[in-house]
Image (cartoon, rainbow, N blue to C red):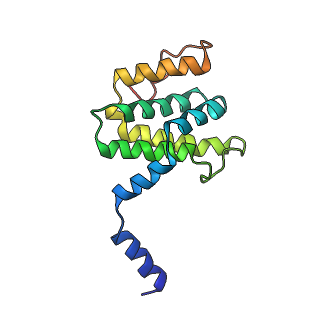
Amino acid sequence: MSNKKQQYETILKNFNPESNLEMTENHYSDEKFWDKIKNYGKKAGKQTVYYSLLLFYTAKSPGVPKSSKMIVVGALSYLIFPVDLIPDFIPVVGIVDDASVIAAAVFKIIQHIDDDVKHKAKQQLLKLFGDDGDYGDIDQQFLK
């Protein structure tokens, strides 16, 4: 067996999701999340910001299982981490990878997104973008 393969197998055998979550949480903070939303929100678009807010408020809900919160923290960490697969400063595609991760996380935890979370997300969206459009059906595509 090759040395690289042995190293990879050792890493997999010793993988501890709990400690990796703690390491990821070191990169995540509510302050960094809000900074990212304020700085890139308009560029990312209302739908991506709304889904990010859904994740944020779902993670704050006490009844959400830790496994779902891990998905949320991972997605939001990817959103705010300055060095991701495609840097955000690259026009269009820099934001698309973040939006894809956020949308995938919403699909994974959709059963934990209740009306209260949707309401909080919509209220925050109004604060961020103003009353320049109809937000009433923003979640109809995926959150019926």
In the image, residue 10 above or below residue 112 = below
Q: Is residue 134 above or below residue 103?
A: above
Lateral position of residue 64 relative to residue 99, left or right: left
Quadrant where the C terminus lies?
top left
What residue sits 37% from the left and 46% below the top? Answer: 70
Q: What x and y, as percent, mark residue 48?
A: 55, 33
Residue depicted at 45% across the width and 42% down the height: 104
Residue 14, relative to residue 69: is it above or below? below
Q: Quadrant of the N terminus?
A: bottom left
Residue drawn at (55%, 17%) of the image: 126
Q: From the viewer's perspective, is 67 left or right of 2?
A: left
* Place of residue 13 in the rendered image (x, y in percent of width and height, measured from the top left): 33, 71
Left or right, 82 with reference to 24: right
Is 36 left, or right, of 12 in this rendering? right
Q: Which residue lies at the image location 32% right of the left edge and 33% below the top edge?
A: 112
Spot occupied by residue 110 in the image (x, y as percentages of width and height) = 36, 34
Rendered image quadrant of residue 130: top right
| Quarter of the view holding residue 129 | top right
Looking at the image, the residue that sits furthest to the bottom is 1
In this view, 25 is above or below 52:
below
**Number of marks drawn:** 0
